[in-house]
Amino acid sequence: MAEQDNQNWGHYLAYGLQMAVGVVLGYFAGRWFDRRFHAEPWGVLAGTLLASRPGCNLLIKDAIRINKD
């Protein structure tokens, strides 16, 4: 079991990287929206929440798959 965990560390690192990149891109898109339409802070909030959703869905889906095994 320990050997399998050591081999999959890159897979887990990809989850964190995907979440971080999604949140950063959502932040900048929301900041652009706020500046363009003068809607502070709603663009940043909506952008980060919407951008973090795909990463959370992937993480939940993989956790369900791991629990089935």
Image (tube, grey):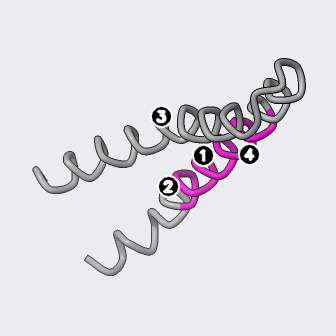
Residues at marks 4 and 3, CA–CA distance in whole angstroms:
13 Å
Q: Is residue 59 left or right of residue 20?
A: left
Disc 3 to disc 1: CB gap under 8 Å: yes
Q: CA distance from mark 4 to mark 1?
A: 10 Å
Left or right side of 28 for 7: left
Residue that extends furthest to the left in the rendered view of this protein: 68
Which residue has dot 2 on it? 11
User: Which residue is tagged 1?
Assistant: 18
* Amino acid at dot 4: Val
Total tally of numbered discs in the picture:
4
Task: Name the amino acid type tagged 1.
Answer: Gln
Mark positioned earlier in the residue sequence (2 or 4): 2
- Residue type, numbered disc 2: His
Circle number at residue 24 = 4
Q: Are marks 4 and 3 in contact (CB under 8 Å)?
A: no
Who is closer to the viewer here, 23 or 34?
A: 34
Q: Where is residue 21? Give x, y as percent.
A: 69, 45
Pair 3/1: label in front: 3
Q: Main secondary structure of the magenta part?
A: helix
Q: CA distance from mark 3 to mark 1?
A: 9 Å
**Residue nearest the observer in this picture, 33 or 65:** 33
Sequence-wise, the earlier of marks 3 and 1 is: 1
- Residue lying at 52% horizontally and 52% vertically, measured from the top left: 15
Q: Which callout, 1 or 2, points to the residue nearer the camera? A: 1
User: Magenta part of the protein: which range?
Assistant: 13-28
**Circles 2 and 4: CB atoms closer than 8 Å:** no
> For numbered disc 1, what is the local secondary structure?
helix
Answer left or right for 8 relative to 39.
left
Q: Is residue 15 magenta?
A: yes
Residue highlighted by disc 3: 54
